Every structure is written in C-alpha cells, then in structure tokens.
Amino acid sequence: MQRPIKKAIFPVAGLGTRFLPATKAMPKEMLTVVDRPLIQIAVDEAREAGIEHFIFVTGRNKSVIEDHFDKQYELESTLRKRGKSVELEILEQDLPAAGQTSFTRQQEPLGLGHAIWCARNIVGDEPFAVLLPDMVMHAKPGCLGQMIATYNERGGGNVIAVEKVGLDQVHRYGVVGAKDWRGNGFTIDRMVEKPRAEDAPSNLIISGRYILQPEVFDEIQAQTPGAGGEIQITDAMIRLMARQPFHGLAYEGTTYDCGDKLGFLAANVAYGLERDDLGPEFRTVLQKIISEHGGRVTWKGE
Ligand code: G1P
C-alpha cells in the first residue's frame, strides 16, 4: 500500500524581480488573482487534495505570508462590530487549523532543489507534495487532487503534472519525455531542465506540482549546481528516476504561469470571468476595452 500524501511544501523564497516594483516590499506570492493571493490559491488546492501540513520555505521579506496564515484579531473584531459576517466567514475558511503550518527559511537563493531540501526535517521520511504558487492550476478537481488519484492508481512512486505548451516556450521550463500512455497518465522516461526547442524531448512541461518520495532529499544533498548555477530539483529527480518510477499526468485544466506578466493577466481574466459576482459585468467591460483598442486577446499555446 502506498503511503498517503499529507504534507506539502510551498517554496516561496524567490525575489519576484519580474514584478518589480510591485514586489519591492511585498512577496510575489501575495499578488492576487482577483482577490485571492497566489499563495492562498495554492494552499486551497492542497487542502482540497487532503493535505494536512503546509510547509512554507520562505526567505527575507516574506513575513507577510506568515501573517496571512494567522488570525488577525483587530481586523476580525472590527468586522464583527460592523456585522460583516460574509467577510469573517471567508477569513475563517481560508485559515489552516492551528499547528498545520510550518515556516522555515532558505537562507541563500541556491535554487528550487535547495529550497525543497530546506524542508527535509519537517517532512521526515514520508512522501510529500510540492506546489509552486506562481503556477496557478485552474482545474476541477484541483491539479494536486488529480495527481493523488494517479498516485493511488499507480501504486505510489513519484508523480509530476505536465502541461502542453508551444515549442517556443519549452526553454523556460523543465520538460519530460513520455512513454506508455494510459488515459492522461504516462511513464516519464526523460527530463531536461530548460532545454532549447531542438533538444526538448516533448512539449510537455513540468508545470509546478510534484509528488515526491523522501529519497529525493538524499539526491539533492549529493548534488552540485546545475542549469543557471542552481541546485535544481529536476537534476535530483533525474537521478532518482534510476531507482524509482516517475509518472506523468497531463492533468485536466489550464496552467497560468503567474511568474510571468502575461500569464498573470490571463489568470485574472479567466478567474474574473467565471466569478458569479463579477463575470457578466467584467465580460462587458472587457469586450468594450478590446473593441476600443482594436486588439485581439491571445494566450500562449493557443
Ligand atoms: C522551476 C522548475 C521547472 C518547472 C518550473 C515551473 O523552474 O525548475 O522544471 O518547469 O519551475 O514553473 P523555475 O520557474 O524555478 O525557473
């Protein structure tokens, strides 16, 4: 019987330089899609998938994230006094229970693999999930929930969610090679971090959700810096592939890369349009803007 996935790591130490000046004093993970911070969207996805322990790997200037997952007594008492019960309920629902969050720091920006490794003692000897909050997965059920179903069907191992992109985009991501497709799942037989289009094994990118076995920590520890001088999680997974299965899942949904301005804007449009309270009016406003600007809305991969 495969061991259940109860812990998730959220690497949130990155500087967010692509969003300056917005991220000068505020962590990029607090940027919002409509009214929900990116980090909250990722935590919601993890909770829906049954995660019980949320581990944030933070850095300097990220204390707002810790505050976000705490009670705000002053705010709550003001809302209560003003009879704002809907807002109070939202705050309550969003909050993980006491003791379900842990925060640890990545002291130096040594790469995503290193950030994940910083959480090793909190994770301990059990399989875990990793969610990169920049990557917003618009899916029902959520992407991690779909991955856990695959994990259970396949009897454990490691699982990576992938998304199809145009070949001109692959150089920005990790890319996998796929064989033995069954439904929307497959076996990963190769991985390359940020390949040139001509070297990419496919157009399936590692989209920012992982289920990993704890042995990956040893692989990270043994590692020297890879692409971009960083300790890459992809390099550790490539080594682990020699002794453990890696399953790919072309999950049902759409990835919005909110580490990128275009993806961030697209996510806001997509989430805004589907909101009951905003969607119809927002559609009218958008149509007006587009017709006035004579522009065409396009999105990568379309
Ligand atoms: C990281 C991973 C890469 C993955 C990407 C998704 O890259 O190394 O494999 O495709 O996240 O966002 P980074 O965005 O840290 O450069």
Image (cartoon, rainbow, N blue to C red):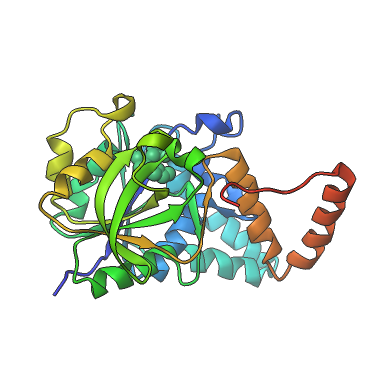
Q: Nearer the viewer, residue 58 or 180?
A: 180
The furthest residue to the top:
229
The furthest residue to the front:
198
Query: In the image, residue 3 lies at what x, y percent?
Result: 17, 69
Number of marks: 0
Q: Nearer the viewer, residue 153 or 133?
A: 153
Query: In the image, residue 106 lies at what x, y percent?
Result: 30, 35
Q: Quadrant of residue 227?
A: top left
Query: In the image, residue 157 lies at what x, y percent?
Result: 19, 62
In the picture provided, is 270 more to the left or to the right than 167?
right
In this rendering, is residue 296 above or below 15?
below
Q: Tell me if residue 96 can be seen.
A: no
Q: Nearer the viewer, residue 239 or 301?
A: 301
Q: Quadrant of residue 261?
A: top right
Q: Nearer the viewer, residue 144 or 153?
A: 153
Ligand 1 sits in which quadrant?
Answer: top left
In the picture provided, is 214 more to the left or to the right than 52?
left
Query: In the image, residue 300 lies at what x, y percent?
Result: 59, 46
Residue drawn at the location 38% of the way across and 48% of the way down: 202
**Quadrant of the snapshot with the N terminus:** bottom left
Q: Tell me if residue 225 can be seen.
A: yes
In the picture provided, is 99 more to the left or to the right than 18?
left
Residue drawn at the location 44% of the way across and 40% of the way down: 170
